[in-house]
Image (cartoon, helix red, strand yellow):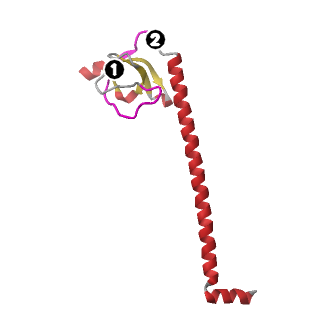
Amino acid sequence: ALARLRAAERSGSLYYKLGLASAVGAAAFWASLESDRAFRREIDLSSREYAQVAAAKELERKPSSGAPLWDGVLTHSQRGLDGPAMLRGARSGDIVQVLKEDVGPGGGYVECRNAATGEHGWYLRRWVQPAEASTA
């Protein structure tokens, strides 16, 4: 058996076979990692979609009513913020009535109503400035 090993080493086939086995093992490992990443992305996307739909249903089920807590001005708008609970069609400079604070993921949103259009939804808290501060 040792003689066969030495002969394979001299001919170079030993290193070829070891290299081939390593490449096949690496490819299988990479495929396994990619499959795991794809599965995790799918789960993450599903959980995010579920959270958005749940938030939208909660907002539709019981929109805040009554007097606004304060009036604000939107300081920033960004395309793509169109989740099911987001304030739609909002633009920088729009006047909003804040109905509820610390809502949404991490409490980073306010529930508000656009004073001009009557649209109702969430907006990022850091992009809503109190109206008094914006006019000073």
Q: Based on the picture, tell me whether residue 62 belongs to the magenta stretch.
A: no
Residue occupied by mark 1: 72
Q: Looking at the picture, which amino acid does disc 1 mark?
A: Gly
Name the residue rendered at 60%, 75% in the picture: 19
Q: Give residue 5's mark.
A: none
User: Decide: marks 1, 2 in contact (CB < 8 A)?
Assistant: no
Stretch of the chain drawn in magenta: 66-86
Task: Check residue 79 for magenta coloring.
Answer: yes
Q: Would you say 120 lies left or right of 14 here?
A: left
Which mark is first along the chain, 2 or 1? Answer: 2
Q: Which corner quadrant holds the C terminus?
A: top left
Where residue 92 sits: x, y (%)?
30, 27
Of badges 1 and 2, nearer the viewer stands: 2
Q: Is residue 136 visible?
A: no
**Quadrant that contains the N terminus:** bottom right
Q: Quadrant of residue 112?
A: top left
Left/right placement of residue 4 relative to residue 79 reads: right
**SS for callout 2:** loop
